[in-house]
Image: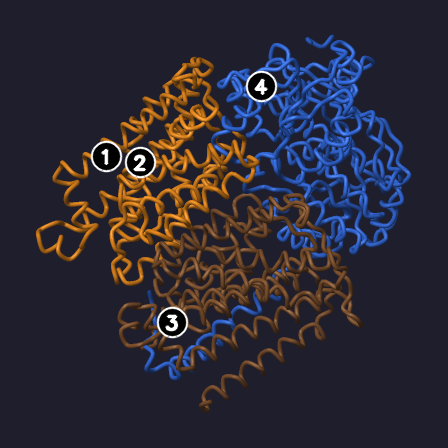
Amino acid sequence: MKRSSHRDLVALLLCLGVLSLLPAVIDTRRMPYLFDVLFSVNVAVLLASSWNILGGFAGQVSFGHAGFAGIGAYAVALLPHHLQWSPWLSLPFAGIAAMIAAILVGGIAFRLRGPYFALSTLALAEVARLVVEGWRSFTEGTQGVVIQQKPLYLFEADGALFYITSLWLAGIALLAVITIGQSKSRYFLHAVGESEEAASALGVDAWRCKMSALLPSAFLAGMAGGILALHTGFLDPESAFSISRSVEPIILTVVGGIGTALGPVVGAVILVPACEFLRSRFPTGHLLLYGVLLVVFMRFMHGGILGMVRRKRL
Amino acid sequence: MDYISPTSIDARLAEEVALSRNVIALIIPFIILFPVTASAQETFRIGAPLPMTGAGAAFGEKFKKAYTMAIDEINAKGGVNGRKLQLVIDDTQAQPPLAVTSVKKLVTSDNVVALIGGWASGVALAVAPLAQELRTPYLLDHPALDDITRQGNDCVFRLQPTTGMYSAALEDFLINVVYERQKKPIKAAYLYVDNAFGQGVAKYGIMPFFKEHSDRFVLGVCEAYSEKALDYKPLLLKVKNASPDVIIFTSYLTDGILLGKQAKEVGLTAKLVSGTGAGHSMQDIYEKSGGAVEGYFSSGPWHGDVTSPAWKKWRGDWEAKYGYPPGEHEIEGYVAIQVLARALESVKSRDVVRQREELRVGLKRTTMVTIFGPVKFENFDGYTNQNRAYNLTALGQWIGGKLYQVWPKRVAERDPKY
Amino acid sequence: MLLSSLVINGLFTGLIYGLIAVGLTVIFGVMRIINMSHGDIVMLGMYSAWILFEKFGVSPYVSMFLTAPLFFLLGSLIYEILDPIPLKRREMSSLIITLGISFVLATSAMLIFTADYRTVTLPYSQRVIDILGTRLGYPALISSAISLVLMCLFRLFLSRTHIGRAIRATAIDRTSAALLGVNVKRISQATFGAGVVLAGLAGGVLAPIYYVYPFVGSNFIIKAFAVVVLGGMESVTGAIAGGLILGVAEALGGAFLEHSLKDIIVFVLFLGVLFFRPTGLFGGRERNR
């Protein structure tokens, strides 16, 4: 590892450490709403970073991340439902289940390029939703599953626990992004994203290369879906696989700066609270304002916020 | 696509870190400051997590109107215990994850004394345990899935019948009229919308009924359909092929409209076609299907004793205020506020946490007769704080553009056309 | 009997799917932009048909052509927002911009028309015609027929007129088209306008057979994507074929599977086609950018 990566790692750990202290400073019981918003920001960072690994670094734009998130969410809901496990202990299986699904997705969709790939991931996410809806004896279908948020041993399943867990998951996602960003495979991913033929001609195994981005991406998306389901305490296919959950990480990443390590973080930190603020102040009109915000943002900062700020500096 | 050139990645990353640190530093104070609101209040705030945008927005709007009307009336008379009621609406888009955040905001930031509404069963399933955890009374006026009041939550109250009860009047009619007249096994078909409501009516209402009475009824085609399809004709053709005597639908509004129109189109008829409340009990379904549902029955929550003067007066007030006749949603919402107002009379403290507990006790003690029917929250058969609403379902029939109550006999406005 | 009814039904519905998708296809073909607001423009088309019918009694089948210029204007305006963005970045940023426009359109419709569900009930809406033993309502029949005619006309427009040829040339290669004297910006703007007009027309065709509410656009968008990809993303013929295939698959799926699961057939078919033809039925080779 190079020295700069050590420095980034230290910076990341320092940030996580400081942010982890927040529940000690502010009482989560008195301000659960604040911690809910912070939790949403963390999950958004997690989901958007996961999308960024595949869409930003490997150039494979996915419209189906809701599929991975949904599968992860159902792993968290169904393991306790059928096996009487603690939902918290089944959280890692959210990522694993999504990764298993990803192998299938890679097998089917990596033959396709550009928009064909994007829209086939959308179709695959829809198939996953329909399977969950149809397999009623196992998944409870459209009626949904209630998840008991049993305490995790000594801890209580309160805002602080959700906040810290999601914070560290987001940290792991960033670590993955930084690691990939500084490893040699970063160049391979970039090359394959630009031109698969050229990369293959130079002896890069394009499929394996794309798979190496898809697997961590799916794992992290599955974790995002899992922790979100756990937090909601209830899961139904419509919200778990909704297209807006596929679209959200794209918005955050592109607005923040696609293909940059911290773009999704900036996007999430700005847009998630902004969206929540608009929703709580304008119950009927908030989407109008949010839409205008997106149009104005992208019209004047095509490269995303980080791209914009960087250009100003140069 | 905007890629960073791979050669300068380390430098770029370091630069990014510096940049985002500035951006984030600007944002954090904003996050920390925004949920802070004053907590001293002279009003009783009632929090309503409702779908104000998205596919359920039409229903969120109905409940908003109903709550507003009831609250305005109560406030015009001076409020409750000298305090006015105030409605705080938060948009859930009918998405459970958003509803959870909404409720936390309503309870801890807006300091509401009670929660009301929710519209979708999925939302209510997510909100109920949270209301319990936050010790805030939650009065359900529409989410009907049985499970919601079967989890032993003493803060969760439900005023209206559950999905399992929706079809009670229809079942009664099928046995006592339809079967009695034909005296031989009756072929039935059942189509229900594939969501929590449809699954609930099927699982707790219709399916157990047909299973129990399999000597008298043969259930042929029986399936869930998707809510937003463009074309239901393949499904209806399949039903037509089985030529049933009785067809039952469990539908929302839009799918109910299309099913009605397209059933006409493919020429599907039966001796009895009935919905189970929801879409089939709304005035809209008649008008917007161009009268295609003429003659359909609908078994659902009672619309109140529509022959009583109090009900007629209320209907007149509603039409004067909003310009259209009220249906099941409007009555439920209006009555829910009245029930809350009655229970709030026993709330004396000034601290909102104590108020919530007093309100919970107050709701538990409430016994009142509303235009919707009698309200009393009881524990029975695994339900907690559920209004015993078996008697609050009635069978209506669309005759000449109006839904008349036709069964049971004691509340019938006119005889069924059958 | 049942089978033939299902197929005929599916074909008629498929024509409407085709019309919804054509506008998406043409915009994608020329600009490589996935227009996320497409469904919401269809919604606007439905509302304009509804309001003209409600207020002035104009049949949607007439009013859809009267409002077409307005939709062209809307399309040109949206294009003006997208145009200054450098081509290299346009693909992703236009995705977000059109998504933002989609939020704006849906919410504005809600603030103007309220969230209530609306339908257009024509005087002859309950009349039925018998085609080969299949009963079809007049509105369904007329809507499908108009969709077919519109798609064929548009196909002819692309191949027979000067502007049409310029559009196709721009779709195939922007740079060469520009070298040969095509004003690429004007053509792109016209294409975007045309795509939006087609979406508006699809709304007019849908109004008498469906219902409209502000967020109805999301009901079609996934199906429209499926049709576009099935046919090959740049091909108008492909969109027509894709629509028909989807319509029939859905009809058969709805009858032989449980109705709520019919879309599994649709998506499996979709993925199957892409497995053997990675650029759709009528699509060319995906260009390397």
Kind of residue at disc 4: Tyr
Residue mark closest to the camera, 4 vs 1 = 1
Residue of label 2: C198
Which chain does the residue under circle 1 lie in? C
Kind of residue at disc 1: Phe
Q: Is residue C268 visible?
A: yes
Q: Are marks 1 and 2 in contact (CB under 8 Å)?
A: yes
Residue mark closest to the camera, 2 vs 3 = 2
* Residue B195 quadrant: top right
Q: Colour of chain C?
A: orange
Residue of label 3: A309
If you read the primary sequence from the N terminus, does the residue marked by circle 1 or circle 2 appear first? Answer: 1
Relative depth, front residue between C53 and A62? A62
Quarter the C terminus of chain A occupies: bottom left
Instruction: Identify the residue at image location x=68%, y=18%.
Output: B316
Residues at discs 4 and 1 both on one chain: no
Q: Is residue B158 above or below residue C6?
A: below
Inter-mark Cα distance, 2 to 4? 32 Å
Kind of residue at disc 3: Val
Could you say whether the residue bearing mark 2 is in a helix, strand or loop?
Answer: helix
Could you say whether the residue bearing mark 3 is in a helix, strand or loop?
Answer: helix
Inter-mark Cα distance, 4 to 3? 57 Å
Q: Is residue A151 above or below residue C285?
A: below
Inter-mark Cα distance, 2 to 3? 39 Å
Inter-mark Cα distance, 4 to 1? 38 Å
Q: Colour of chain A?
A: brown
Per the rendering, the mark at residue C154 is 1
Rendered location of residue C193, percent (x, y): 27, 41
Instruction: Identify the residue at image location x=29%, y=53%.
Output: C32
Residue of label 4: B286
